[in-house]
Amino acid sequence: MTMDCGALREALESLRSLPVERYLASTAVASALARTLGDIPPLPWEQNAECHVGGDDGSLFVVDRTDITGLPEVHLWAMNPGELRWTLNLAAARLSDSFVVSVASGGSMCETEAVRRPCLDEMVLHRRPTPGTSKDESVILLSRDGPNALARTGAYARDLVGVMRESGLDAAALVDTGGLWRSRCHLEQLDRDVLEVAGFQTHPDFRRRGLGGRLLRAINPPTKHLIYLTPIGNSASIGAARSAGFDPLTVYRKYLVQ
């Protein structure tokens, strides 16, 4: 963190005051700010995020170093296109090696500055939950059924389920008649009213049967917004989300800076 808490707080509130579509498109940055400021619980794998605020119009970005096997990623929310220069200069000064810049809202960058990597692009989909509408008893929830019940499905190892509970995460698994998982996911809080459906997967032996969409339809926590993030080339993942009522919101375009 390179700015005082007052500047970070002002930046977070500026994001929260955006129209809802733009605010939800900025949640990668808003989440890091909210965790840094203690508005939402920090997750163990997000301890090393660095928040930066500056430029002429108070643009902001986050340096995410959580994936130690890959390149650092810079999540950018620019208040105007001219702020890209500020971001690239400061990020390059902070990082000694190559990094990926993620530009929300389908933004673009000068190709002489960075190389587009369409294979890394991610689509953000959005749905407003309708709490209490799902009565699917084949869905095992960490919050409802407990860690032992979820671990018995085979969806997650028992120690991982424990870490999830300690980190304030919920998880769910759709099971067959034998109680074994066929689709799974967990929920991460991105901001006060936003949850992300993360780690979504349908068992390889049971794909193309609508089981993933069935699980996603059953996820209806008491929050205002659900976000679903997926590689833009993963048509099966996008199809499952859309069948569960998620609509495309924006695209995170990825650029490699060397």
Image (tube, rainbow, N blue to C red):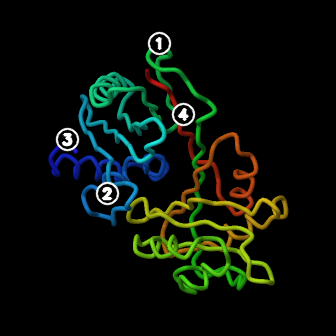
Residue type highlighted by circle 4: Arg
| 221 w.r.t. 102: above or below | below
Q: Does residue 103 appear to the left or right of 183 in the view shown?
A: left
Q: Secondary structure at mark 2?
A: helix
Residue type highlighted by circle 3: Thr
How far is the residue under mark 3 from the one under mark 4? 25 Å
Check disc 1 and report the residue beneath it.
Answer: 112
Question: Residue 97 sits in which quadrant?
Answer: top left
Chain-order first, disc 4 or disc 2: 2
Give the class, few, some or many, for how many residues have Cα within 10 Å of label 3's Cα (few <14, many ≥20): few
Chain-order first, disc 3 or disc 1: 3
Q: Does residue 212 appear to the left or right of 43 in the view shown?
A: right
Name the residue: 22% across, 45% down: 1
How far from the left and from the top, in percent, is residue 37?
24, 58
Pick whichever, 36 or 95, lies toward us: 95
Tell me how many marks there are: 4
Give the class, few, some or many, for how many residues have Cα within 10 Å of label 2's Cα (few <14, many ≥20): many
